[in-house]
């Protein structure tokens, strides 16, 4: 049996969690990074590291059966397609599946209303606009090369090392309140299982929202984390007068609830953590 080989470009948090699922099943996973420290971490975890800028990727990608793009676009567009388009063209005949990690930010602001994969894209931030452009680039090249491309629009990601508990414990957590503000989120383990489900169904390419079942205002998540820890509830702060960085404030530019019906229906996914409460409970039990 041919070894399944995943080439992971921009091998970050979500991709590393997917690798933890695939490696015990006999997969070979190759991950790119820009830092020697990360390369050493990958090597220790069983992932073959590729140090961008120092090692060529054509041979590594050429033998891959699967390709995951996690690196976000920059001011000049998608970095993979800009630097490795010809490599992708050469590797295309061997690729059974291509996954692109995008964001629900492509939908923009909907005033707290529901969105799904058919909702028109009206991004409200530079990051969202860049993602729409990158999605379009990938759809066009996938059509040209006959690639089985799936685009995964991820909600706010949390999980081990990325939960609210540390900030609640050290007193830096904030409960910023903005009228009608609501977000969707997703545990990183559920991202990994969605990606694996898609890999196992290469005949079901498409666009998938990846989020849990319970969008809520962000202050509720902080409040529940404090409750689980038995610590005082951080005071509420009004968004209009709160002292925030421009980056932090930009996350409140969009309010929407994201539907995940297609992900469940077409990929057969049953969420491990269907809401933030079950996810936070699990993180706390794991000592996060």
Image (cartoon, rainbow, N blue to C red):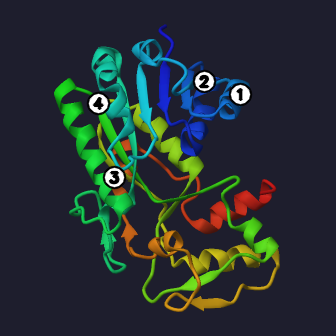
| Front in this rendered view, residue 13 or 201 | 13
Q: Position of residue 69 (x, y in %)?
A: 42, 36
Q: Position of residue 64 (x, y in %)?
A: 43, 18
Q: Residues within 10 Å of mark 1 (few under 14, many from 20)?
A: few
Q: Position of residue 164 (x, y in %)?
A: 68, 67
The kind of secondary structure element at disc 2 is strand
Callout 1–callout 2 Cβ contact below 8 Å: yes
| Identity of the residue drawn at 64% across and 63% down | 278
- Residue wearing tag 2: 49
- Residue wearing tag 3: 131
* Label located before the other in sequence (1 or 4): 1
| Front in this rendered view, residue 112 or 241 | 241
Q: As drawn, is 41 to the left or to the right of 217?
A: right
The kind of secondary structure element at disc 3 is helix
- The circle drawn on residue 148 is 4
Residue 253 sits above or below residue 192 on the image: below
| Front in this rendered view, residue 246 or 59 | 246
| Identity of the residue drawn at 51% across and 12% down | 3
Callout 1–callout 4 Cβ contact below 8 Å: no
- Residue wearing tag 1: 40
* Label located before the other in sequence (4 or 3): 3
Q: Position of residue 87 (x, y in %)?
A: 34, 19
For marks 4 and 3, give the CA distance.
19 Å
């Amino acid at each position: 049996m041919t070894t399944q080989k995943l080439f992971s470009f921009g091998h970050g948090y979500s991709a590393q969690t997917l690798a933890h699922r695939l490696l015990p099943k006999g997969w070979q996973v190759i991950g790119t990074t820009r830092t020697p420290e990360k390369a050493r971490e990958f090597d220790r975890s069983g992932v073959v590291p590729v140090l961008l800028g120092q090692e060529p990727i054509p041979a590594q990608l050429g033998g891959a059966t699967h390709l995951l793009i996690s690196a976000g676009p920059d001011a000049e567009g998608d970095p993979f397609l800009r630097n490795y388009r010809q490599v992708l063209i050469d590797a295309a005949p061997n690729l059974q599946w291509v996954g692109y990690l995008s964001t629900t930010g492509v939908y923009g602001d909907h005033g707290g209303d529901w969105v799904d994969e058919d909702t028109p894209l009206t991004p409200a931030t530079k990051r969202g606009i860049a993602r729409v452009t990158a999605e379009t680039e990938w759809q066009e090249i996938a059509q040209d090369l006959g690639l089985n491309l799936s685009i995964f629009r991820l909600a706010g990601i949390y999980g081990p090392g990325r939960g609210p508990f540390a900030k609640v414990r050290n007193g830096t957590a904030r409960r910023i309140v903005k009228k009608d503000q609501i977000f969707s989120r997703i545990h990183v383990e559920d991202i990994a299982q969605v990606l694996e489900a898609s890999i196992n169904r290469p005949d079901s390419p498409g666009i998938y929202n990846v989020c849990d079942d319970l969008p809520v205002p962000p202050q509720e998540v902080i409040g529940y984390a404090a409750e689980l820890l038995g610590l005082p509830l951080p005071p509420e702060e009004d968004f209009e007068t709160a002292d925030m960085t421009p980056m932090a404030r930009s996350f409140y530019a969009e309010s929407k609830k994201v539907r995940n019906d297609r992900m469940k229906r077409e990929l057969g996914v049953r969420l491990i953590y269907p809401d933030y409460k079950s996810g936070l409970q699990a993180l706390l039990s794991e000592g996060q």
